[in-house]
Amino acid sequence: MNSTEVITEPVQTGPNAFDIGFMVVMACLMVFVFWLTTINYSEGMKTEVAKRNGEAWTEWLTTAGTTRFNDDYAHAPCSGKAEPGTWGECAAYIKSQTSLKALVNTFFDKPPEFIPQCNKEDRSTTGAIVIENMVATPPGSAVPFIVKPLTNEDLISTKLQLRITVCDKGGYSIKVSEFEF
């Protein structure tokens, strides 16, 4: 061969089969990531709505707790002077006669339930509200208060120190607030 002879082959400027395969795989991954992001956002918003439900209960009970021992209190079943005045009567009244009746547990599209505690093994507790009664112990005790679920039979004739938590999708509790009612 002579050194002056140059073999010229056309230069390939378009993608080859491997390039096209890579682009297809990347496009599929982008679609998958977008789909997964949409699902995670939706589930996160459901948890956020559950927290807002707990915050709404906290706000209502805190506001009601400031005036519930007055003679002209508007919500008689929740009054501190009601006889016998149980939490069950007050909760039923709040769920049916106040603005809180419109709250929805978005995980199940039904009103939020009250449960004694969140349970990781029981997925039906997702989005539920836990209201706990924090009972003070005598001064000097090693434990400042005892936490127990607020039951329907508990009397509300005295001030109560309450804690509200909500259950997330995994059954773990999310603390919302501690307040006086």
Image: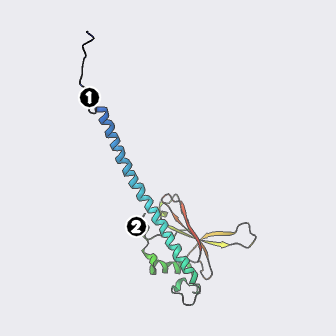
Q: Residues within 10 Å of mark 2 (few under 14, many from 20)?
A: few
Three-letter amino acid code at the position of disc 2:
Asp
Mark 2 secondary-structure assignment: loop
- Residue lying farthest to the right in this orientation: 140
Which quadrant, please, contains the N terminus? top left
Q: Is residue 40 above or below residue 55?
A: above
Position in image of residue 94 (x %, y %): 49, 79
Q: Quadrant of residue 154?
A: bottom right
Label 1, label 2: how many angstroms apart (C-alpha)?
A: 58 Å
Numbered circle sitting on residue 162: none
Q: Which residue is mark 1?
A: 12
Position in image of residue 133 (x %, y %): 61, 72
Q: Nearer the viewer, residue 128 or 70?
A: 70
Position in image of residue 121 (x %, y %): 51, 57
Report the side of 11 relative to 88 (left or right): left
Nearest to N terminus: mark 1 or mark 2: 1
Q: Is residue 98 above or below residue 142?
A: below
Report the mark closest to the observer, 1 or 2. 1
Q: Is residue 121 above or below residue 143?
A: above
Mark 1 secondary-structure assignment: loop
- Residue lying farthest to the bottom in this orientation: 71
Position in image of residue 144 (x %, y %): 70, 69
For image coordinates 27% across by 11% down, the residue present is 3
Three-letter amino acid code at the position of disc 1:
Gln
For image coordinates 44% across by 62% down, the residue present is 46
Q: Which residue is mark 2?
A: 109
Report the side of 160 relative to 76 (left or right): right
Which quadrant, please, contains the C terminus? bottom right
- Residue lying farthest to the top in this orientation: 1
